[in-house]
Amino acid sequence: MADAAQKWASDVLGSLAHVDEPLDPEVEAAPPEESDDSRERLLRAAEEIASERGYKGTTISRICKQTGLPASSVYWFFADKDELLAEVVQHSWDEWSAAQPAWNPPEPGQIWDAALRVTLRRSVRSLLDAPSFMRIGHMLTLEQHSEELAARTRFLVIRGGIGEGIAGWFAEFLPPAAIDAEPALPHVLAQTLIAATDGFFIGHQIDDAEPSVPGFVEFLVDILASTVQRATEPEGR
């Protein structure tokens, strides 16, 4: 899943036409010895500010104040605020996906839904930590902007890649009869799974009480399994 999403994400342009704070042609290059550390500090600061204040509240001046770095450092690494936030989303996704369990095939004698339960118990639990690519990405999809934002586009591309990866897993391991009956079934199940986990994530942001991950996973997989079963049943049954 991570490989598919990262391939999709790598095709996104680093900057769209939207320019929040234009690049000053007179900006000097950041010292090479500080490049890696400075870029990481800028990403972390922008991530924290965007999570608290939203897109409009994330300004170059706030980022510089929090990091202690000059504006020239921001513009050395990023064309504008929009590109910076797109990289924040990508950076958070890369970190989160690297820690996720692989979507392995079912073990010998194991049916697909049992394998799915094992994977989802870990990946869904990690959403309780509110990864920034989810927080910022959902926020940007709900906010109204006159122009498309690179950060929003990056999130949607990553999300689309996740969906394709999950659909590919279903296509490989669902009963062939189910796919023969409903060729679109792998994508339908992938969309359902993503929509459900979106709801799980947002619900946890609203309610501080920790939800039952095992209960949610059982409920979700039962729905998916029932959908597959209906696809293989004779019509009119």
Image (cartoon, grey):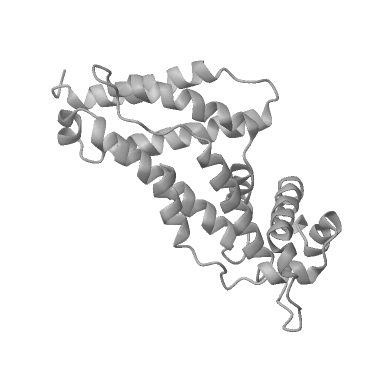
The residue furthest bottom is: 26
Up-down: is 80 above or below 105? below
**Percent coordinates x, y for residue 41 in the rendering:** 74, 54
- Quarter of the image for the C terminus: give it: top left
**Percent coordinates x, y for residue 216 in the rendering:** 50, 20
On the question of residue 229 being in view, the answer is yes
Image-quadrant location for residue 70 = bottom right
Q: Nearer the viewer, residue 189 or 83?
A: 83
Instruction: Name which residue lies at 57% across and 69% down.
Output: 15
**Percent coordinates x, y for residue 80 in the rendering:** 68, 69
Up-down: is 143 above or below 234? below
Up-down: is 123 above or below 46? above
- Relative placement, left or right, of 146 versus 68 is left
Up-down: is 48 above or below 147? above
On the question of residue 187 being in view, the answer is no
Instruction: Name which residue lies at 76% across and 83% down.
Output: 26
Image-quadrant location for residue 200 = top right
- Quarter of the image for the N terminus: give it: top left
